[in-house]
Image: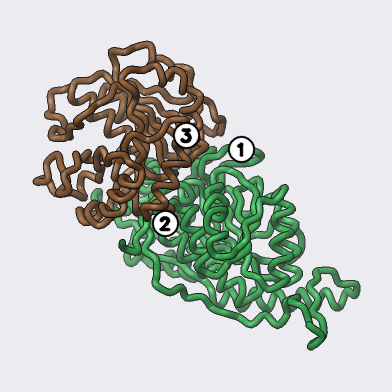
Chain colours: A brown, B green
């Protein structure tokens, strides 16, 4: 399983928490970032549970990456109805296993907007007992509607933080136009994200970009000095698009 | 920052409507298109527009009727079961000759069915669905960029002919995300709506919007006017994309999401020595009979294969267009499933060998 060198070998965080929550607006890239973050953890030797807690949207979610996820040795917890015709907002009971088994890391992929983040509020008591406190990452793609200015990102952070009952502890700068993106996106949108982080008083913890959009010689950091998580697309609409 | 934005299909529809001058949106939520309402709720106040979550789909379509009668650019959106509820309103809108844009992000049916993508509403969209002799223009985009561009165009077509214009998408198109490149200026046509009920201010005779006619001859005159208009639309507004058709052995026909799968199959088929072409109707009504017939008539063509997310609906129009000169086969998936490339390739190989 770990025969190959880790894909994100050079990626490292100063302060890695056992439980990482990813929240964000619809289509901010939460699921792709969550899946790739979980893959990075497992490739660097940490046992990982990935929880698909998206009760908002039944389409295109981290459970859609089931094969890639399970092949990578990640334990997936997903609603029983994920990927089916049933539109039932149910949180899988198995999510509580992440509190009981302190030997595993946990990545929680939370549904979009404030409605999605509200799921976190239901786990607040258990999350509050976890030491050190879980990381709450707000995934921001400045190329998405309603996320393209610092003010909009600050509003989003406040809306989602309030719904989740947990304020974001860091931003993830996911400058992304999928396959149409290139290395200029991160630098072009950096001032917007940096300013949002300043206004919120939290760091931009790391950046994420499609692996094909950033040059290999950047290694594990962007030119701005952020840890860079290279994303391998795991959720596709069609087989070879 | 650049004018490229990463958008969901549903968001692109909503933004396109606003850019096309739509300031009145009436809807009722249903998966997989609710992001349109969500986007409208956020954006309409920014442009002094109105988003109303109506008490039902029936109410929403009648609000559309009212706003259109007053000359507004107006839109409603829904998904299959919700569109069924709106059919009476569509017929009234046709009878009253009102311009309106309706989006159907189709989900799997029949009945409550499911929330996954389908194209099972082709018959309903193109052959009526409501009562009486009427037609809706039906546009079938196949990408998020095209959802944006065709939604703008749908408003122009609706105003140009005073017809209901429908965008027929599916759950995949509505939910998928792709970059959209926005134009600096939209090709928005402005039509004078001298027929609209905008208030006379005592300066003109009042306008009447109606679909009821007491006299048989008067109603027949309306029907004749409508049919003349539909003939004009059929002459002027047909759109189709043809891919790799020249000298092809097998011609695929597919719209929307299916056409994208077919384009990938064309490349795969070429690798095993089978030349496959595709006719993709962009207008489902008026149907591009000529493009289909021309592709089919080539001596190289052995057969046509129609691919849909239903049990075989557009294939009837393909057969009418081909008119017996070549065999027309069908392969479809239902229930919310998408055909795989291999499934389509297997069908092609059987036809190419025969």
Whether labels 3 and 2 belong to a single chain: the reply is no
Q: Which residue is mark 1?
A: B113
Task: Tell me the quarter of the image containing the N terminus of chain A.
Answer: top left
Q: In the image, is residue A91 above or below residue B289?
A: above
Picture quadrant where residue B45 is located: bottom right
At a point 40% along the width and 47% down the height, the residue shown is A154
**Towards the viewer: B97 or A33:** A33
Q: Residue furthest bottom?
A: B203
Q: In the image, is residue B344 above or below residue A120?
A: below
Number of residues whose C-alpha sits closer than 10 Å to that of mark 3, classed few (under 14), some (14–19) or many (20 or more)? many
Q: Distance from label 3 to label 2 (Cα)?
A: 29 Å
Q: Which residue is mark 2?
A: B143
Labels 3, 2: front one: 3
Q: Measuring from the top left, give residue A211's x and y in whole percent.
A: 21, 44
Judging from the image, mark 2 belongs to the subunit labelled B
Secondary structure beneath dot 2 equals loop
Q: Measuring from the top left, give residue B157's x and y in whole percent.
A: 57, 72
Labels 3, 1: front one: 3
**Towards the viewer: B113 or A224:** A224
Picture quadrant where residue B165 is located: bottom right
Q: Distance from label 3 to label 1 (Cα)?
A: 28 Å
Q: Earlier in the sequence, mark 1 or mark 2?
A: 1
Residue B282 vs residue B108: left or right? Answer: left
Picture quadrant where residue B235 is located: bottom right
Disc 1 and disc 2 in contact, CB within 8 angstroms: no
Judging from the image, mark 1 belongs to the subunit labelled B
Number of residues whose C-alpha sits closer than 10 Å to that of mark 1, classed few (under 14), some (14–19) or many (20 or more)? some
**Towards the viewer: B137 or A198:** A198
Q: Of the numbered discs in the image, which one, if any, rests on residue A24?
A: none
Q: Of the numbered discs in the image, which one, if any, rests on residue A117?
A: 3
At a point 27% along the width and 21% down the height, the residue shown is A73
């Amino acid at each position: 399983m770990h025969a190959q060198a880790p894909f994100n070998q050079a990626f490292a965080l100063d302060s890695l928490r056992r439980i990482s929550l990813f929240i964000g607006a619809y289509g901010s890239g939460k699921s792709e970032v969550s899946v790739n973050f979980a893959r990075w953890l497992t490739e660097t030797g940490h046992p990982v549970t990935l929880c698909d807690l998206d009760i908002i949207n039944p389409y295109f979610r981290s459970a859609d990456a089931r094969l890639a996820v399970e092949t990578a040795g990640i334990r997936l917890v997903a609603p029983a109805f994920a990927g089916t015709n049933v539109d039932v907002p149910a949180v899988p009971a198995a999510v509580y296993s992440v509190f009981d088994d302190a030997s595993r890391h946990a990545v929680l992929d939370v549904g979009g907007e404030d409605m999605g983040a509200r799921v976190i509020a239901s786990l607040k008591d258990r999350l509050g007992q976890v030491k050190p406190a879980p990381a709450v990452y707000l995934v921001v793609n400045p190329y998405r509607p309603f996320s393209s200015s610092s003010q909009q990102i600050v509003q989003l952070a406040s809306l989602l933080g309030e719904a989740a009952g947990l304020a974001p502890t860091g931003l993830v700068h996911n400058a992304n136009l999928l396959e149409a993106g290139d290395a200029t996106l991160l630098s072009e949108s950096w001032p917007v994200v940096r300013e949002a982080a300043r206004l919120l008083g939290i760091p931009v913890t790391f950046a994420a970009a499609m692996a094909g959009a950033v040059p290999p010689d950047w290694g594990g950091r962007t030119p701005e000095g952020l840890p860079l998580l290279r994303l391998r697309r795991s959720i596709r609409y069609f087989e070879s698009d | 920052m650049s004018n490229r934005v990463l958008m969901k299909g549903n968001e692109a529809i909503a933004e396109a409507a606003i850019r096309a001058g739509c300031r009145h949106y009436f809807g009722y939520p249903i998966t997989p298109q609710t992001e349109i309402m969500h986007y409208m709720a956020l954006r309409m106040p920014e442009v002094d527009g109105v988003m109303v979550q109506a008490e039902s789909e029936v109410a929403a379509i009648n609000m559309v009727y009212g706003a259109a009668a007053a000359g507004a650019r107006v839109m409603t959106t829904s998904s299959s079961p919700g569109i069924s509820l709106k059919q009476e309103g569509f017929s009234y809108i046709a009878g009253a000759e009102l311009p309106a844009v309706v989006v159907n992000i189709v989900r799997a049916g029949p009945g409550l069915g499911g929330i996954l993508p389908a194209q099972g509403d082709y018959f309903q969209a193109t052959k009526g669905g409501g009562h009486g002799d009427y037609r809706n223009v039906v546009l079938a985009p196949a990408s998020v960029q095209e959802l944006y561009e065709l939604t703008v165009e749908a408003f122009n077509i609706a105003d140009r002919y005073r017809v209901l214009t429908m965008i027929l998408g599916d759950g995949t198109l509505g939910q998928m995300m792709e970059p959209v490149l926005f134009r600096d200026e939209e090709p928005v046509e402005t039509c004078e709506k001298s027929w609209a009920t905008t208030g006379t201010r005592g300066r003109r005779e009042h306008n009447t919007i109606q679909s009821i006619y007491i006299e048989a001859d008067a109603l027949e005159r309306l029907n004749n006017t409508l049919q003349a208009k539909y003939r004009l639309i059929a002459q002027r507004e047909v759109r189709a994309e043809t891919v790799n058709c020249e000298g092809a052995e097998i011609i695929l026909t597919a719209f929307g999401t299916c056409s994208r799968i077919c384009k990938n199959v064309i490349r795969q088929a070429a690798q095993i020595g089978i030349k496959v072409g595709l006719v993709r109707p962009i207008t489902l009504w008026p149907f591009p009979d000529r493009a289909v017939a021309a592709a089919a008539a080539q001596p190289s063509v052995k057969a046509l294969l129609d691919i849909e997310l239903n049990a075989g609906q557009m294939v009837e129009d393909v057969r009418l267009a081909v008119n017996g000169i070549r065999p027309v086969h069908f392969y479809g998936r239902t229930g919310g499933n998408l055909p795989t490339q291999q499934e389509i390739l297997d069908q092609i190989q059987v036809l190419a060998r025969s």
